[in-house]
Image (spheres, coloured by chain):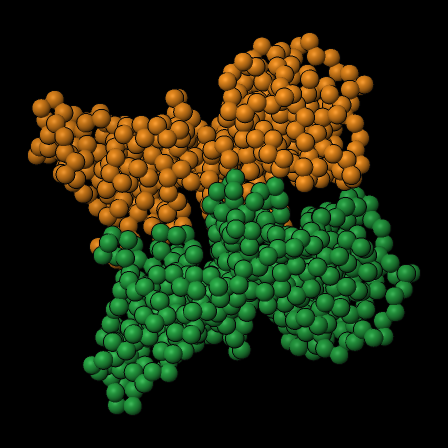
Chain colours: A green, B orange
Amino acid sequence: MGSIEGIGSQNWIPNQTTRTEIVNTMSSINVGLIGFGTIGTGVVRYFLDGRGEPHNVRLAKVVDSDLARPREVSFPHLTDRVEDILEDPKIHVVVELIGGENPAKEFMLRAMKQGKSVVTANKAVLSRHMKELFAAARKYSVDLAFEASVAASIPIIRVLEGFRGERITKLSGILNGTSNYILSQMEQGLDFDAALQMATEKGFAELDHSLDTGGGDARDKLAIISSLLYDSEIKPEDIYCEGITSITSVDLDFAAKYGVEEGEPGYSIKSLATVQMSQDRLEMNVYPALISKRHPLASVRDELNAIYLEGELSGPQFFQGKGAGREATTSAIVSNILGVADNIRQNVTDGLPSLESKVNLKDEYQIARKGYVRINLKHAPGSIAEASAIMAKYGFNIEDFIQRRRFQSLVNDEVVIPDIVTVEPLSYSTLEQALTELEQSDRVDGKPFFLRFKQ
Amino acid sequence: MGSIEGIGSQNWIPNQTTRTEIVNTMSSINVGLIGFGTIGTGVVRYFLDGRGEPHNVRLAKVVDSDLARPREVSFPHLTDRVEDILEDPKIHVVVELIGGENPAKEFMLRAMKQGKSVVTANKAVLSRHMKELFAAARKYSVDLAFEASVAASIPIIRVLEGFRGERITKLSGILNGTSNYILSQMEQGLDFDAALQMATEKGFAELDHSLDTGGGDARDKLAIISSLLYDSEIKPEDIYCEGITSITSVDLDFAAKYGVEEGEPGYSIKSLATVQMSQDRLEMNVYPALISKRHPLASVRDELNAIYLEGELSGPQFFQGKGAGREATTSAIVSNILGVADNIRQNVTDGLPSLESKVNLKDEYQIARKGYVRINLKHAPGSIAEASAIMAKYGFNIEDFIQRRRFQSLVNDEVVIPDIVTVEPLSYSTLEQALTELEQSDRVDGKPFFLRFKQ
């Protein structure tokens, strides 16, 4: 995305004479776009192709801090002054595509104060300031539309809005395309680094991939979804989060074979963002998990996103599509622009929730989850005995203890073999103590890793 | 669904004094339900459970022709006079759940004329009278909402409305749960009759299953979807349609193995409803087809419905959920009721397309499709030669000619073996002549059957 640097708001003085003009049902709606980066280029191209015309919607101005950057398309009304959009009474809709918390949030608030509706793809701002932004939209009787902020082309926000009369008891999503691409490649046999490199070469992973592979990106999106589902202000930091960087080929190999002898189709490993209401407490988490190949989420390949949910009346539902990329994101933005334009002409707004409900959050550390511990044991008599003794001390009820000799390696001239120990459900707080003690044993190489089954 | 018999409209006289009352943004919205059958019971239960109250929406009256029928739930304001709803100025929304073309259509038109919005699950009326009903909704400034008419719980109508700015180049759906359930059972080894019986026992198939297994139900739904997608009046009879009744275990066995030796995952057989714009002509068809197990539609099991579509910007999208059943259908109806109630309070309506665009339809008989011919050949020297000669005459370019001896049977004391002949794309008009000539050969038992690959 592009960025607007150096455009401070401190000099901006509210000016009621620039209040956005009133329109009627036949009016042309004018759009101002802030941020002429990758996604912005997609939106500009859409309008340059004349595709806004049948809807009587035109792109009037584009703002970007960098006027000189070479671009695939040029737009005649390009400026580097954000005031040219925010203070133009003829602009009805502001599309914010600069990303990041600031100054994006400030621009959105200023636009709404001027009576302009806002369309944004900005999950970072939304997930952290949703309540304040929604309140501003209500106060100034404008729309704030953000379909593109979650799962790009999948119209999940629209779908969830349509389920207002329904109780969604559980939702699980693959919300980060980069992580899913990497795990898909690892399932084909690549190791993490090689898979990450492929993702970078294909343009799925950014130079700093930590938000993707660390789970932060999916967590922001889950915060947005959860807030909408439970009409409550849920922040990213309320959500337990683990990335995929600890996953190795040993895990994928084990997953593919697990249960196959018993006639099951095996498992995949997916980074899942899950929200679930359980005994009046909300469980939310982002972590990689083993998921049966029977489950629709298991077959979501490469950079695709998907959402699985269970409605009390509607039953299980599954949605899959492109979660990133210029065209896919443009489709969501354009859908929002046209919807907002219709609302402006009819002088109505879509209702936004107040997010004032209080919900009790369940502490992920206290929840017992089924999973396995992967532990690198030195290949010598007594290693398994010692590891087993530590696990017994913490109450592990072991199902299987499987040596994965095929993945053995040499560490300081000693043979180290990864072992997979499947265990009955254990709370993460207990588990963490056990993992720490295991790590301290001189029979163990490195930090043991716990991988959960999909809840 | 229930039915209203014997309530004629000929005595009904428009009466402006019963015009539906005007509401404000705080008003309670009153719903009148026509048809207290299976689905109606789901809607009644929802409101009896108090779930309309948070939305300030109440179920005021229910009409059914049969007051005496024992029901799971009873509703205090039950009447057998449809006028009690249609002429009550305090009823703002009419939910039509009697099914069938008449008198449902007449009730919907009368309700709209009285200023009432209409929610319906009636695909038979919608697919045949959409343009007239949409025009009435616009004329009387009311909403006509019909999410439940296609794929029950999957909010596909809502999704398609959101894609207004997008070009959908192709859409393929599994829109009939009964057919999909039967084919799923056949994939597990049952023959058609046994699978049908299971579907009937589970309540998926009605006593007269011809609309389901013959494709007519899916065709109605595809007509609704296609009309919306291309803003054109498309009738069920515009759509080529074949049911699943000719599918046998031979086909499913062949499908599962096809391509497996080459490392492909094999094929499923699904009844697909497809609309596609190809060189400015619209192709629409409902037929069973071979579909690679790599495709998300191939793994849609049992009575589920699913829709796969390709958007020019959004790329491939896939939606899966329950396509029938009381709760799933209720979820769609409730979603519509709440959306319509919001609109009434804001004094707006959702825009409905005029359906006045002209599209050129492509004749399915003229389209070359890849597929195979299944032909029952008498097991005697010369049979294959004769069948091959007929096929050669009609220009069949044969890929494989596979004898399926495992499925041989005795017909009039002669051994008959089904053969699968995969052929390069052939137009159905050519094919039909060839199939007729093959059928007339005394080497052939019964009518040969052509099964297409998914286009």
Residue occupying the far bottom of the picture:
A412
> Residue A40: x and y, percent?
65, 65
Report the quarter where the C terminus of chain A lies.
bottom left
Residue B435 visible, this angle = no
> Residue B270: x and y, percent?
36, 40
> Residue A390: x and y, percent?
33, 75
* Camera-side residue of B92 and B300: B92
* Camera-side residue of B323 and B81: B81
**Which residue is at 36% across, 36% downward?**
B181
Residue A222 visible, this angle = yes
**Which residue is at 23% across, 80% downward?**
A382
Q: Is residue B359 left or right of residue A189?
A: right
The answer to whether residue B296 is above or below residue B71 is below
Quadrant in the rendering for residue B443: top left
* Camera-side residue of B205 and B105: B205
The answer to whether residue B263 is above or below residue B121 is below
